[in-house]
Image: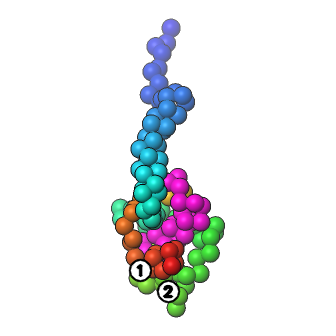
Amino acid sequence: MAPRAESTFLSLPALSLALLILSVPLAQAQAQAQAQGQKTWCVAKPSSEEATLTANLNYACSQVDCSILQRGCGCFYPDNLISHASIAMNLYYQSRGRNYWNCYFKNSALVVTTDPSECARLVFFS
């Protein structure tokens, strides 16, 4: 009789429970910020890979109008990938109701309560 191989993977119920437990603090933090009337923004994590930022930028701009990122528009500068990706991700996040899950982007984004830029303030809260 062959020895039985041990599975190193979590069962589906255990994985679901783990994900639920991990999501509760995020939901609570967002609810607290909203209850206190704080504005929130979605920004790219500085440690994100270039390919991830490009994918996030492309996805967000396929879902929302990113024309403010074009040369000559108010949010073109600074002209770098992390800035443009953050603005596009924030446009998506804002348009979807500012829910923490709309700022996940495969764990490459953060919800912040400090205004990341003059552009964000002008675009979202003027």
Q: What kind of residue is marked 2? A: Gly
In depth, the one of 5 and 23 nearer the eye is 23
Q: Secondary structure at mark 2?
A: loop
Q: Is residue 89 magenta?
A: yes
The residue lying at 53 percent from left, 81 percent from top is 69
Residue 86: where, in percent of width, then height? 46, 69
Q: Earlier in the sequence, mark 2 or mark 1?
A: 2
**Front tag of 2 and 1:** 1
Estimate how packed mark 2 is, as few (under 14), some (14 to 19) or many (20 or more) residues with alpha carbons within 10 Å.
Answer: some
Residue 24 vs residue 107, the one in the foreground: 24
Q: Which residue is mark 1?
A: 118
Q: Is residue 63 above or below residue 31?
A: below
Q: Callout 1, which amino acid? A: Glu
One can see residue 25 in this view: yes
Residue 94, horizontal then vertical, whole percent? 55, 65
Magenta segment: 82-101
Picture layout, residue 5 above or below residue 72: above
**Which residue corresponds to mark 2?**
74
- Depth check: give the residue in front, 64 or 15: 64
Residue situated furthest front in the rendering: 36
- Residue 49: % across, % down: 41, 63
- Taking the image as shown, residue 97 lies to the left or right of residue 17, namely right
Left or right relative to 8: residue 92: right
Residue 61 in which image quadrant: bottom right
Q: Residue at 59% x, 81% y: name it.
A: 67
User: Residue 8's x, y, as percent?
Assistant: 44, 28
Is 59 displayed left or right of 103 in the figure? right
Query: Is 85 in the magenta?
Result: yes
Answer whether residue 80 is visible to the viewer in this image: no
